[in-house]
């Protein structure tokens, strides 16, 4: 689990330690092709969670008036952008992907400073944006509809895909480049204009994405970037009649609020929400393989992934052996600043998350689960000024316990013993969520049964619950979303309207 040392990472760390931090840069909103301050005249700090006294950058504390200006600019730019041929739109996105590739390590370092996860993970975050940008660019030259025969003579039928209009995109802090990219790229390729509102914990990565799209040739007004408080800005964006669609990644609670607001006027919304993801470990599984996979899926990104493994449903015959292995992995995990080459797990995104995760440790103990390791903030020595929490493992967890039902969003894994495959599936499907699920087994019969039986949008066989590939759809069932899918060839369709066209051409007598 310790981060592999590379020459690039060592050089970056040395530069970080040697160079004093300069006055942080103040970033502006990008509206209508101009970088401009918020009408509020106020800013907020983007804080390094590994060193909470360090301000990474400053951003505009925007108001609904800034959202109004961004929507006006997006409306003004829409006619020209939707008339731009899709292959030309794709070329701009491809150029952006190549620019991200050129600057990947520099951008990854900034992301680690503002979000905390280790460099190998922030490099991977940006790689996802690169890969999906290349994939989506090619969609600009693919068939956008179908031509089908008519039941009538001298008539043909076809479908075409058209943009929705202005799209509002609201993104989270845990994947601050990948998720803005995998929403913005297909929205733009489909011919929409965009207002992007990133999470206030990680606006710098979204600002870099905006800068790169501008450099790639995106016309003024097509993408507008506004920062500030999620509540007031989100509601202003979601309720404005000029917005044709909202795309949100966030908590299930926030998703329900957005869905309610959009539902008032039947506005389209795409929601990618929470998860309480389970790994099933059968008694015939490769235990060492399962332990390694769960350690990565549970503690990678400090457990702050919607697909993170938070439950391990283990056959009682191997439960003790699995628990011992996972505890050993957790206890040897090096926690620290993500810029350090030896760091395996960085901080939580802010101090509030430390408090929230620790509350679940206390809940688990009150519920009667057994704390095997962790369960405390790490505030000693070089970790004293960071938002650190120890990798935490609970055993003897019952399926009805809150720690087995509610999303913790931290380095927190609950082990639930079961006696059979049937019981394992029942437990796995017992939460309100259905994002990601996995099973470890050497039985081909069990594999195919699990593919059928697990109620989740993503199913992994002999792998952890995390990871996505840009050419495959991503999304969940139940309260993990509202049925839409991101990534893959369907991504552009999510941001499109399908129009059916009937053409009659009878011979004129």
Image (cartoon, grey):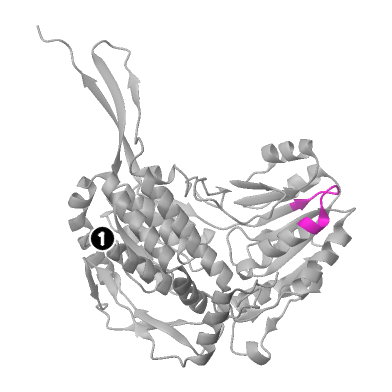
Residue 284 included in the magenta stretch of the image = yes
Q: Quadrant of the C terminus?
A: top left
Q: Using a 10 Å C-alpha cutoff, classify the residue at mark 1 as few (fewer than 14 neighbours), some (14 to 19) or many (20 or more).
A: some
Q: 82 or 457, which is in the foreground?
A: 82
Q: Residue 417 location, x and y as percent?
A: 83, 56
Quarter of the rendering containing residue 353: bottom right
The relative height of residue 89 versus residue 320 in the rendered view (above or below) is above
Q: Quadrant of the N terminus?
A: bottom right
Residue plotted at (21% across, 53% down): 78
The relative height of residue 272 versus residue 210 in the rendered view (above or below) is above
Q: Residue 301 location, x and y as percent?
A: 60, 68
Instruction: Give the residue at the far top of this rendering.
Output: 509
Instruction: Give the residue at the far right of this rendering.
Output: 317
Q: Residue 209 location, x and y as percent?
A: 37, 66
Viewer can see residue 244:
no
Residue plotted at (46% across, 93% down): 20
Magenta extent: 280-289
Instruction: Give the residue at the far front of this rendering.
Output: 7
Q: 493 or 64, which is in the foreground?
A: 493
Quarter of the rendering containing residue 106: bottom left
Q: Secondary structure at mark 1?
A: loop
Residue 321 included in the magenta stretch of the image = no
Viewer can see residue 451:
yes
Q: Residue 220 location, x and y as percent?
A: 21, 62
Kindly identify which residue carries mark 1. Answer: 217
Q: Is residue 12 found left or right of 143 in the rendered image?
A: right
Residue plotted at (68% across, 39% down): 451
Quarter of the rendering containing residue 405: bottom right
Q: Is residue 397 found left or right of 168 in the rendered image?
A: right
Q: How many marks?
A: 1
């Amino acid at each position: 689990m310790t981060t592999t040392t590379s020459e690039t990472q060592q050089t970056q760390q040395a530069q970080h330690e040697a160079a004093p931090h300069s006055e942080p840069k103040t970033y502006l909103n990008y509206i209508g092709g101009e970088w401009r301050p918020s009408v509020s005249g106020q800013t907020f700090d983007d804080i390094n969670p590994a060193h909470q006294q360090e301000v990474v950058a400053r951003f505009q504390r925007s108001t609904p008036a800034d959202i109004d200006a961004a929507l006006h600019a997006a409306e003004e730019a829409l006619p020209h952008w939707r008339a731009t041929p899709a292959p030309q739109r794709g070329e701009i996105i491809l150029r952006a992907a190549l620019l991200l590739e050129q600057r990947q390590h520099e951008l990854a370092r900034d992301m680690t400073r503002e979000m905390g996860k280790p460099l190998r993970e922030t490099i991977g975050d940006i790689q996802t944006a690169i890969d999906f940008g290349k994939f989506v660019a090619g969609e600009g030259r693919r068939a956008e509809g179908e031509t089908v025969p008519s039941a009538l003579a001298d008539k043909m039928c076809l479908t075409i895909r058209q943009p929705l209009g202005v799209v509002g995109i609201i993104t989270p802090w845990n994947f601050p480049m990948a998720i803005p990219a995998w929403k913005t790229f297909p929205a733009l390729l489909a011919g929409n204009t965009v207002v992007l509102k990133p999470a206030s914990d990680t606006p710098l990565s979204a600002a870099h994405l905006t800068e790169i799209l501008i450099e790639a040739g995106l016309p003024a007004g097509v993408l507008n970037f506004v920062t500030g408080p999620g509540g007031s800005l989100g509601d202003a964006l979601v309720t404005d009649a000029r917005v044709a669609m909202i795309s949100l990644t966030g908590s299930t609670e926030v998703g329900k609020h957005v869905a309610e607001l959009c539902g008032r006027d039947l506005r389209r919304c795409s929601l990618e929400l929470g998860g309480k993801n389970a790994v099933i470990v059968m008694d015939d599984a490769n235990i060492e393989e399962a332990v390694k996979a769960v350690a990565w899926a549970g503690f990678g990104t400090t457990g702050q992934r919607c697909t993170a493994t938070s439950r391990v449903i283990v056959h009682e015959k191997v439960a003790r052996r699995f628990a011992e292995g996972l505890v050993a992995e957790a206890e040897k995990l090096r926690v620290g600043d993500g810029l350090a080459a030896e760091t395996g797990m960085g901080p939580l995104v802010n101090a509030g998350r430390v408090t929230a995760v620790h509350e679940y440790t206390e809940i688990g103990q009150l519920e009667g689960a057994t704390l095997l390791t962790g369960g405390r903030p790490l505030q000693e020595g070089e970790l004293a000024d960071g938002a650190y929490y120890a990798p935490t493992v609970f055993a003897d967890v019952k399926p009805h316990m809150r720690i087995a039902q509610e999303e913790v969003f931290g380095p927190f894994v609950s082990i639930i013993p079961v006696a059979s495959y049937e019981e394992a599936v029942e437990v796995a499907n017992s939460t309100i969520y259905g994002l990601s699920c996995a099973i470890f087994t050497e039985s081909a019969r069990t594999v195919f049964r699990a593919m059928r039986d697990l109620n989740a949008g993503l199913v992994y066989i002999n792998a952890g619950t995390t990871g996505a590939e840009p050419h495959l759809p991503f999304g969940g069932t139940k309260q993990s979303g509202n049925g839409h899918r991101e990534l893959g060839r369907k991504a552009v369709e999510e941001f499109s309207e399908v129009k059916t066209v009937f053409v009659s051409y009878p011979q004129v007598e």
